[in-house]
Image: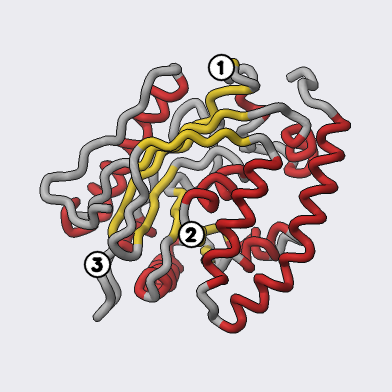
């Protein structure tokens, strides 16, 4: 793909990003260590500034669930998904254990109280318990159910194992499960076609830093986010059926967004709990 960004813009944005991020890291570390509510609020404030800096124009359809702890289930396209979701709600994320060891970005993930998982079959029970505990504390978690990033053209198959976290912990509050679709649809107001989508989507064997440098030199990126009707594990009946429901709702809205059509939230399962 041809270079379509500006090196000068990338350099300017990188300087501003570092100037914004580095001073806030010890502040957030203190908030997390002390268990202060600001540990949830500061990342949202910070990521809203990052979204503005990197030219993300976010259009939201639907409303994030807010009646209690929520497991947001989403498709995964890019590291930008972290910025987008963190701008819209106070959330933590589920990430692979390898990310915890990354310099700088691993530190940022820890500062947002990311739950790191090995995604091995024998570790699923322990990891689901960790997610349950976080939800029982009243936190919200974003689960990228594909387990990896994709090209943004379609959603991959959702893995049902970690949907066990949607089972409320003993004595804990009910957990809402809300499917969320994210799509990157425009570049400087023009449709982001399949050929250009790799400028935003980070997947496969793409190297992180070269991709990130190319991205921050781009213009304004249109992002569509659709919050579908919340449901629950009890309403779905099983982890497998819950994963299938989320995958179906997210995939349909992703196809609509990529085709340039107006997206609508998918309806809830009959009698679903956890309404916003």
Picture coordinates of residue 147, whole percent (x, y):
49, 49
Place of residue 78 in the rendered image (x, y in percent of width and height, measured from the top left)? 59, 40
Q: Secondary structure at mark 3?
A: loop
- Circle 3 residue: 174
For the question of whether residue 237 can be seen, the reply is no
Residue at 61% across, 76% down? 31
The reply to whether residue 92 is in sight is: yes
- Alpha carbon of mark 1 to alpha carbon of mark 2: how far? 29 Å
Find residue 170 and report its image quarter.
Answer: bottom left
> Quadrant of the rendered structure where residue 107 is?
bottom right
- The image shows residue 108, relative to residue 73, as above or below, that is below
State the residue lying farthest toward the bottom: 34
N-terminal label among 1 and 2 = 2
Task: State the quadrant of the N terminus.
Answer: top right
Q: Residue at x 42, y 68 (%)?
A: 139
Residue 81 pos. (x, y %): 55, 44
Q: Position of residue 242 (x, y in %)?
A: 26, 49
- Which of 197 and 8 lies nearest the eye of the viewer? 8
Q: Mark 3 or 1 closer to N-term?
A: 3
Seen from the viewer's position, the closer of residues 169 and 27 is: 27
| Rendering colour mode | secondary structure
Q: Which residue is mark 2?
A: 91
Question: Dot 1 surroundings within 10 Å: few (below 14), some, or many (20 or more)?
Answer: some
Neighbours of disc 2 within 10 Å: few (<14), some (14-19), many (20+): many
State the residue position of label 1.
Answer: 191
Instruction: Residue 102: name its quadrant.
Output: bottom right
Mark 3 and mark 2: Cα distance apart in space: 17 Å
Say above or below: 189 vs 161. above
Tag shown at residue 18: none
Mark 3 vs 2: CB contact within 8 A: no
């Amino acid at each position: 793909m041809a270079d379509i960004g500006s090196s000068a813009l990338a350099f300017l944005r990188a300087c501003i990003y570092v100037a914004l991020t580095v001073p806030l890291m010890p502040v957030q570390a203190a908030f997390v260590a002390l268990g202060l509510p600001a540990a949830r609020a500061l990342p949202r404030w910070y990521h809203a500034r990052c979204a503005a800096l990197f030219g993300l124009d976010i259009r939201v359809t639907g409303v994030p669930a807010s009646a209690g702890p929520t497991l947001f289930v989403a498709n995964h396209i890019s590291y930008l998904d972290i910025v987008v979701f963190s701008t819209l709600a106070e959330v933590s994320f589920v990430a692979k254990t390898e990310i915890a060891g990354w310099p700088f970005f691993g530190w940022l993930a820890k500062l947002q109280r990311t739950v790191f998982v090995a995604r091995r079959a024998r570790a699923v029970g322990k990891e689901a318990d960790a997610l349950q505990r976080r939800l029982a504390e009243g936190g919200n978690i974003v689960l990228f159910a594909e387990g990896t990033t994709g090209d943004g053209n379609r959603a991959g198959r959702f893995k049902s194992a970690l949907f066990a976290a949607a089972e409320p912990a003993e004595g804990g509050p009910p957990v809402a499960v809300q499917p969320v679709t994210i799509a990157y649809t425009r570049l400087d107001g023009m449709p982001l076609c399949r050929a250009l989508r790799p400028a935003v989507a980070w997947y496969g064997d793409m190297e992180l830093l070269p991709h990130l440098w190319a991205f921050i030199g781009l213009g304004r990126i249109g992002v569509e986010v659709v919050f579908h009707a919340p449901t629950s594990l009890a309403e779905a009946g099983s982890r497998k059926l819950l994963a299938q429901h989320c995958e179906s709702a997210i995939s349909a809205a992703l196809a609509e967004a990529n085709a340039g059509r107006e997206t609508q939230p998918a309806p809830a399962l009959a009698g679903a709990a956890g309404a916003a």
